[in-house]
Amino acid sequence: MAYTRFIPISVAVVLAIIIVALAATSAKSAVYTPQTITLRVGYPDSLDESDVSDLYAYSHILAQEGINVIPTYYDAPPLSYKGLVSGQQDIALVSATSEWEGVAQGEQTTVVACYAIGGTFLMTAGQNITKPQQLIGKAVDDFGPGSETRALDQYWLNISGVPYNSVGPNPNSVYLRASGGNIARVHDLETNVVQAITVDDFILSDLSSPSVNNTAHNGPFHVLFYSPINVLSVCYAVRDDWLSNPHNQQVLIKFIEATYEAQRYFILHPNFAIKYEEQQLPLTPPSEIQYVMYFYPQHMTYWPYGNFNLLGPLSIQNSFENTNKFMIINGVNSQPLPNSSVKPYGVINGYFELQALKALGPFNYPCQPWVNQQLIMAIQEYVPQEFGSPPTSCHPTNTTFSS
């Protein structure tokens, strides 16, 4: 069963591929003793809706464990990985592109958890463009070389047989143009500076209203591509010299446990989540935050079961294999990486996430406005029963939230 995503504006192409990743060497056990610990965590860009639940984990859960988290938000995606390998950070949220590039160049880093199934990005085109071939001779905004959005653009265009370049406008290819953040890219699309943008998926809320999705703003807009759900996208990575310390392993398990617990709390209490996000993101329109609180859980961005201990097409073995294919298609790597490229823990490792999930216990997904039959079937297919179960039936609505 392939999980089908729903979007509020017309969709030209919704991609779904089969996924990646390999399993775990077990780590040495150690008894965790609460004490005051400082944990440095890096992020690949500014704080947004997908990261806010982490702040709740830091202030309401880990602080009570004696773990003081200092988050750092870098202004370009590759810098988060560079901050990790240079020793500035203990844990970093990095793009899979950065991880695969780094390991290919000899870095010893391991991905240990992912906060969402698949990526949180999509490509939206204006001017009523509905096919990627219509982008030839036009421009697409992304975050630039080394970013997950650039890797996705290259992947999508390669599988579509559409030529591209990163030098400048060309009548025979698509110009991939480095731009600023989401707001800057939306402005470029609406003013026809570019004809498509690759952005975080919550930007749909800004483009889908009738007051914007029109010719006056260079629409109508159509989603050409979604991030594949079975390829690793943005995940937490650590250096293996840090991970080799048994005490750090126990801190890492606590960290993963807390971040997943926070997402579970947001799912259970969406009204609280909305108010908390509005406090943390005062410049973000409340309508966008409310939209995300419906959109993210349904599209498995708020996902309470982890990534590396799932079943079937989302198993860690399939995830690793398909991420390798993704990196070759988009030109990041010329050949697949063996998981043993990083010793002793691998390029990706599900052991630490598994210990966190066991500590959390099962999560029986509640009936919430976004729960539809597709989400119920996805949980049934991908999630081992010991991790939890979906409700037997729900009646979704877009407007009513339970507290």
Image (tube, grey):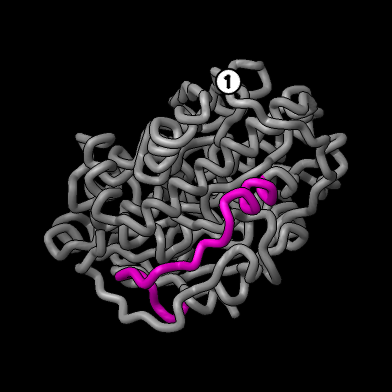
Q: Position of residue 111 (x, y in %)?
A: 68, 40
As rendered, which of 82 and 199 lies closer to the eye? 82
Residue 206 is covered by the magenta coloring: no
Quadrant for the C terminus, please. bottom left
Above or below 239: residue 179: below
Q: Write down the region rendered in magenta.
A: 353-374
Left or right: 130 with respect to 116? left
Seen at 54% across and 38% down, the residue is 147
- Which residue is more in the foreground, 310 or 196? 310
Quick check: can you spot residue 356?
yes
Viewer-proximal residue among 133 and 304: 304
Q: Name the residue under label 1.
A: 35
The image shows a total of numbered marks equal to: 1
Is 354 in the magenta?
A: yes
Q: Which residue is drawn at 31% across and 76% down?
A: 396
- Of helix, strand and loop, which one carries label 1? loop
Q: Position of residue 387 (x, y in %)?
A: 61, 63
Q: Quadrant for residue 378, please give it.
A: bottom right
Q: Is residue 158 left or right of residue 343?
A: left
Task: Please state which amino acid type lies under the numbered disc 1.
Answer: Gln
Q: Is residue 216 left or right of residue 183?
A: left
Image location (x, y in percent) of residue 262: 44, 46
